């Protein structure tokens, strides 16, 4: 029975590698509308959070690094009540994890005004997470929206 978490991890990775998402959302792209549970356990929709910074922890209960990162993530959520901290269980929502191209967990994603600003796997130490939170709050979203618009297909002169 001790192999069950490893077996699920291998299945998750194999499924991700064999069937990569066709339309994976990447950093700098507009995120699709999705729902996630916030720190209070309430379901919130991304499109209703304009102007807020949304931190998303992709995790699974069988993942050791996810269990280590969880308390760090929760402490940060308590320090920043104006932000939205949500969690996506990759076991319960594999299609959403696939859409975002999540192949390793934990993965932290930062979304602001529906644009993905950051997405990296790994259990961050608390100081590094706090630094990312500070950086995400300081991002000039007018500049980001202009960059996103310029990168849209058909926008370039040709």
Image (spheres, helix red, strand yellow):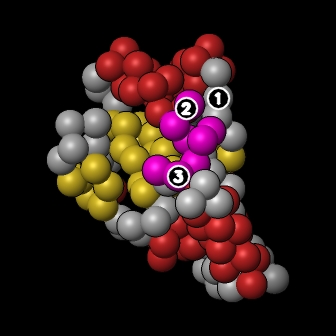
Q: Main secondary structure of the magenta part?
A: helix
Query: What is the CA distance from the residue labelled 1 to the residue labelled 2?
Result: 7 Å
Q: Does residue 103 appear to the left or right of 136 in the view shown?
A: right
Q: Which residues are magenta?
A: 61-68
- Residue under label 2, please give it: 69
Residue receiving disc 1:
124
Q: Residues within 10 Å of mark 3 (few under 14, many from 20)?
A: some
Q: How many marks?
A: 3
Q: Can you identify the residue that label 3 sits on?
A: 62
Instruction: Estimate the x, y position of residue 124 in percent, counting from the top left.
Output: 64, 29
Rendered location of residue 136, percent (x, y): 54, 31
Most foreground residue, 116 or 36: 36
- Distance between the Cα atoms at labels 3 and 2? 13 Å
- Helix, strand or loop at mark 2: helix
The structure residue drawn at horizontal position 65% and vertical position 67%, both measured from the top left corner, is: 7
From the viewer's side, name the closer residue of 38 and 48.
38
Comparing labels 1 and 2, the label whose residue is closer to the camera: 2
CB of mark 1 within 8 Å of CB of mark 2?
yes
């Amino acid at each position: 029975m001790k192999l069950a978490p490893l077996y699920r991890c291998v299945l998750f990775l194999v499924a991700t590698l064999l069937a990569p998402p066709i339309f994976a959302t990447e950093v700098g792209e507009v995120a699709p509308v999705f729902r996630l549970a916030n720190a209070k356990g309430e379901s919130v929709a991304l499109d209703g959070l304009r102007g807020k910074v949304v931190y998303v922890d992709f995790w699974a209960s069988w993942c050791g690094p996810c269990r280590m990162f969880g308390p760090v993530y929760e402490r940060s959520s308590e320090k920043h009540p104006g932000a939205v901290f949500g969690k996506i269980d990759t076991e319960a929502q594999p299609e959403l994890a696939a859409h975002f191209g999540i192949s390793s967990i934990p993965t932290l994603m930062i979304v602001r005004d529906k644009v993905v600003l950051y997405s990296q796997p790994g259990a961050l130490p608390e100081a590094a997470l706090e630094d990312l939170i500070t950086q995400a709050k300081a991002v000039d979203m007018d500049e980001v929206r202009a960059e996103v618009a310029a990168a849209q297909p058909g926008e370039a002169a040709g």
